[in-house]
Image: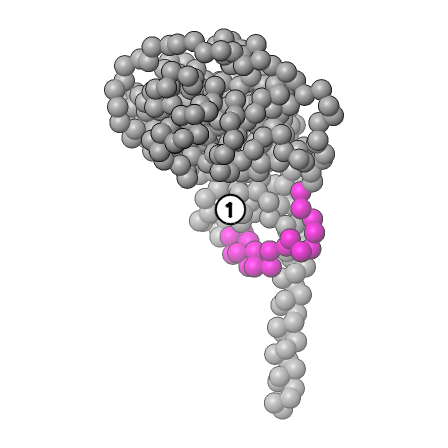
């Protein structure tokens, strides 16, 4: 074979490989969900197909806290992941309140409560919003006394719903060629091969469902869950006691000014909320209901609100390709938080 022919052959193979990768990436569809990404699954199979609702412009604010607010939300990805979809916008629309959100991973609580803005313009309410699976590792480690905090009253927040047309529009999963991940097909092919020989090295599990009306993905009788949810099986009664104590001490820090009330909105794991409909028997039972039933601070009981909606057939309360909520989940969360504040005498 001549050098010229060999060079053409090599270039042809390289070009064919690139083209094949683009075609396969297009077939798999652009990555969106965290579970399809870390598990190397095809978006075309597990991506949601009903549009989500997004707010443009936002009705709540995020990032550096500079201006006085009625409610300060601190949380993980359930409070911060996709601002245009978040439940805080729905709550702001329902109430007219000024709501700001901070990422709890990037704040020092002692510095925050001693900051000028917190002391000069304390929020009426602090809402702590985090996921169930992190409760043991993060909150059972917070030191302090476990004695109850003496309740005090604050001026109620007045509910003044937004009367103008909401700035919402449908949002569809990405489909643009520019959003394709050209390196993903190789990882997907390797993971698919290992899964077929019963060696799944990813961080996700595919589970079959007893109902096919709970998700809008291409195969709604299956969904993805995060393997970290399985760590709940190692929780002990002493861990649960320490979890409750940890949140009590969070409340103590934020309420020390006697001007701010602290409440929580604990997001259930996806595997917890869909457990009644998952056919796989190896998923550990959730401790969340027991923890929140004797919780030392007011909680929005998202587990109850989301479970009721799912039982009635609400689709994409959680996204099939993700650990997080779809539009219905965000709206339900906002409604549950508002109901909590009214019931606690903090709003009217």
Question: Is residue 154 visible from the viewing direction of this image?
Answer: yes
- Judged left or right of residue 4, residue 301 is left
Residue interval drawn in magenta: 173-192
Q: Nearer the viewer, residue 318 or 218?
A: 318
Q: Is residue 200 above or below residue 323?
A: below
- What's the residue at 55%, 53% (across, down)? 188
Residue visible at 29% across and 23% down?
242
Q: Is residue 70 left or right of residue 220?
A: left
Quarter of the image with the C terminus is: top right
The residue pinned by badge 1 equals 39
Left or right placement of residue 132 versus residue 274 in this view? left
Secondary structure, magenta segment, majority class: helix
Q: Residue furthest right?
A: 165
In this view, which residue lies farthest toward the bottom?
2
Where does the image place residue 249, in percent across and percent down from the top left? 32, 22
Q: Using the rendered image of the protein, determine whether residue 313 is visible from the camera's viewpoint.
A: no
Up/down of 292 relative to 321, above or below: above
Query: Where is 82 relative to 336, above or below?
Result: below
Residue at 63%, 77% in the rendered image:
11
**What secondary structure is marked by label 1?**
helix
**Position in image of residue 177 (x %, y %):** 69, 55
């Amino acid at each position: 074979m001549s050098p010229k022919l060999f060079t053409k052959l090599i270039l042809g193979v390289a070009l064919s490989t690139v083209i094949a990768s683009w075609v396969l990436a297009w077939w798999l569809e652009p990555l969106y969900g965290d579970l399809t990404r870390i598990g190397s699954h095809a978006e075309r199979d597990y991506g949601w197909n009903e549009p989500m609702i997004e707010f443009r412009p936002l009705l709540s604010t995020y990032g550096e806290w500079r201006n006085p607010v009625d409610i300060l939300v601190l949380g993980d990805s359930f409070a911060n992941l996709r601002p245009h979809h978040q439940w805080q916008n729905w709550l702001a629309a329902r109430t007219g309140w000024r709501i700001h959100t901070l990422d709890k991973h990037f704040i020092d609580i002692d510095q925050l409560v001693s900051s000028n803005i917190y002391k000069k313009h304390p929020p009426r309410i602090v809402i702590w919003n985090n996921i169930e699976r992190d409760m043991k590792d993060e909150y059972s480690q917070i030191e302090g006394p476990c004695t109850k905090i003496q309740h005090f009253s604050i001026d109620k927040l007045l509910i003044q719903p937004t009367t103008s047309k909401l700035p919402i529009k449908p949002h569809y999963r990405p489909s643009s060629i520019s959003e394709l991940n050209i390196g993903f097909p190789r990882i997907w092919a390797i993971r698919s091969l290992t899964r077929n020989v019963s060696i799944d090295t990813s961080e996700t599990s595919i589970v079959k469902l007893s109902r096919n009306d709970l998700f809008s993905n291409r195969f709604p009788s299956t969904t993805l869950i995060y393997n970290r949810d399985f760590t709940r099986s190692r929780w002990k009664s002493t861990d649960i006691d320490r979890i409750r104590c940890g949140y009590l001490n969070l409340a103590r820090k934020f309420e020390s000014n006697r001007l701010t009330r602290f409440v929580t909105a604990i997001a259930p794991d996806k595997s917890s909320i869909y457990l009644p409909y998952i056919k796989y028997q190896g998923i550990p039972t959730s401790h969340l209901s027991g923890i929140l039933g004797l919780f030392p601070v007011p909680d929005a009981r998202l587990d109850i609100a989301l479970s009721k909606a799912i039982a009635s057939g609400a689709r994409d309360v959680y996204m099939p390709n993700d650990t997080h909520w779809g539009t219905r989940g965000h709206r339900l969360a906002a409604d549950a938080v508002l109901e909590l504040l009214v019931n606690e005498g903090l709003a009217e």
